Amino acid sequence: MFWIAVILIVGMGIGHDVLRDRNKRIIKERELSLKEQELHNEQLRLEVEKTKLEAATRYQQYLEYEEERKEQA
């Protein structure tokens, strides 16, 4: 009976260690996934800013073109 109790206690300890290691791995994977998502969001934000700047530049060029056209007319 004593040896059964010892085996159960040791088995529970090993099982606890396995679960703890698994949980640590899952946490690390989720942190990495979160960092990847943050980088992707930052990349998208930068693309939006780039598009806004391009649109503003094109609009400014259009206004300058219209102004030149009015002066020539």
Image: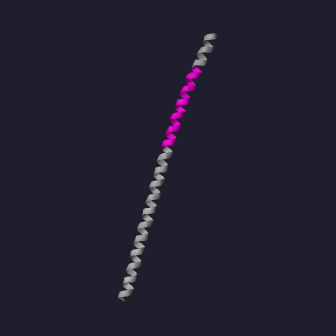
Main SS of the magenta segment?
Answer: helix
Looking at the picture, does residue 28 appear above or below residue 7?
below
Image coordinates of residue 16 in percent, x first then y, are 57, 26
Query: Residue at image x 43%, y 66%?
Result: 53
Looking at the picture, does residue 52 appear above or below residue 66?
above
Query: Residue at image x 37%, y 84%?
Result: 69
Q: Is residue 72 left or right of residue 27?
A: left
Residues in magenta, as a range? 11-32
Q: Is residue 64 left or right of residue 22?
A: left
Q: Is residue 29 magenta?
A: yes
State which quarter of the image contains the C terminus: bottom left
Is the image coloured rainbow, by chain, by secondary structure, or in one colour?
A: one colour
Q: Looking at this view, name the residue that lies furthest to the right.
A: 1
Instruction: Name the one closer to the observer, 14 or 4.
Output: 14
Q: Quadrant of residue 20?
A: top right
Image coordinates of residue 45 in percent, x first then y, are 47, 58
Q: Looking at this view, name the residue that lies furthest to the bottom.
A: 73
Image coordinates of residue 60 in percent, x first then y, are 41, 74
Query: Residue at image x 51%, y 42%?
Result: 31
Query: Residue at image x 40%, y 72%?
Result: 58
Q: Looking at this view, name the residue that lies furthest to the left.
A: 72
Image coordinates of residue 56 in percent, x first then y, are 43, 70
